[in-house]
Image (cartoon, rainbow, N blue to C red):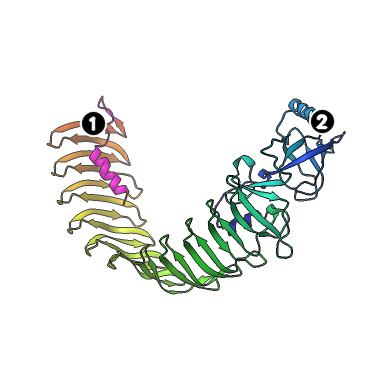
Amino acid sequence: MKIKTLCAVLGASLLWPALSQAEIVQRQVVTAIAGEQDSEGADVLTVAANTACGGRQVRMDARSVGLDDGPYEAMKARLAKQIRSKTPMLVTLKKCPDDASVPIVRQIAACTPAACADGRARLYLHERFFPIEQEKAPNVLVLPLPKGKLPGTWKVEIYSVAGHKLRLSGQVNHADYAQGELVGGYVTYYPNGKTEKQVAQDGQGRQHGIGSKYFPDGTLELRGDWRHGLPEGEHQRYHATGKLSETSIYRDGKQLDGPVQTFDENGKLSSSYTLRGGKMEGEMLTYFPDGKISSRAEMQNGKFNGVSTNYYPDGAVQARMTQVNDLPTGEAMEFYADGKVKSRQQYGDKGGLLSIQRYSPQGVLVLERKWDAQLREQGTSRSWYENGKPEQAIDYVNDRRDGWSRSWHEDGSLKGECQYVAGKAQGGCGEAPPAPELQRKEQAWRAL
């Protein structure tokens, strides 16, 4: 189904429902129901005007309209009366068949004035413009499609169900929208009516020419040239403030190697790096708004390889770690603004955390934990109050409490203790929860 191509062009990232869920809704006057069912046991209805799929016949059975046999026969008896009185009906088709077979009815009901304002068929569409059931659809397309400006195309104008705002205008290369591809260029719109995207295309539906994307307030977000589906030349990305974020240069669909700079929403230099073979290579720098360096890192083949350092605005080191192929290794350290150590973390060869020690601003050790190569907590995990007195100590073996768990008041007096064996408390002491301070420091560690 070509509808997948349509949404890929629009940049959607969606799980695709079967197109059998599509619905085409049209007002029709049923003129006859065949006296005998067809070879598949379905009733064949004749309608007064061509359906959106072409032809003047539709077919249905109890299963297609979701009824048991008894209610289905009662519905057919009511339908016979409406045929005699020429009552307009709202007929919902599952979809237009891929072949020349007769379309299948999903629902049929007498018209209401609100639902039957005209006799046009309607295809109901998802936010990203593929067909879905009417009750879930924010958008609608009136059928049949008129001829487009280009030979062999049909004009598409999709509107929101609520507010009747234009959401997409363009043309497809098939009279059946769900079977077609957008060709020759299209425009999409935000619900507020402002332009979202302007996409130029060639006759095969590939992006070709200048393409633009806008923020909801109309400010330009992206603009660049395309050649038969590949980016070419200069492409710019902007912040919502209107300031340039980044410029990229393409040739034959590939970004050219060389220095790259990005800018913040105020137009200040944000980062700089070098592309080699389409990947970051060498030193990558980020900057504070005043132009001072915020961080520096060594890149190799597009990954962090080497020492990465973060700085405070005054130039003091805030954190430092070594990475190999994006994974931390060895000792990583954090520092307070005055240069005192805030934390030490030890990592294994595969990026797993092996130990952590955290310190108060006064240099007092307040947390200590250890893990083995399988990331199981081992040994005694300890926390201290900032006055240096013990807060909690918990013995672990293979990630389970095994040994003593003790906690203390800030004055040093014992608050409680319990002995564990293989994770189970012994005696009547029960499971003592980690002290709030230990939990807080653990959360702080997990945020690193």
The numbered disc on residue 447 is: none
Residue 299 lies, with reference to residue 95, above or below; the image says below
Residue 319 pos. (x, y %): 26, 59
Residue 447 pos. (x, y %): 32, 49
Residue found at x 25% / y 27%: 429
Image position of 354 (left or right of 54): left
Which of the image's four quarters has the N terminus? bottom right
Q: Quadrant of residue 62?
A: top right
Residue 347 pos. (x, y %): 31, 55
> Looking at the image, which residue sits at the far right?
35
Which secondary structure, mark 2?
A: helix
Residue 35 lies, with reference to residue 356, above or below; the image says above
Nearest to the observer: residue 97 or residue 366: 97
Quick check: is 432 in the magenta stretch?
A: yes
Q: Amino acid at mark 1?
A: Cys
Region in magenta? 425-446
Eye-nearest disc, 1 or 2? 2
Q: Quadrant of residue 74?
A: top right
Indicate which disc, 1 or 2, sits on the residue closer to the N terminus: 2
Residue found at x 13% / y 44%: 387
The numbered disc on residue 80 is: 2
Which secondary structure, mark 1?
A: strand
| Label 1 – label 2 distance at C-alpha | 81 Å
Q: Quadrant of residue 309?
A: bottom left
> Residue 44: in sight, yes or no?
no
Residue found at x 35% / y 55%: 351
Q: Which residue is mark 1?
A: 418
Residue found at x 59% / y 60%: 187
Count numbered badges in the picture: 2
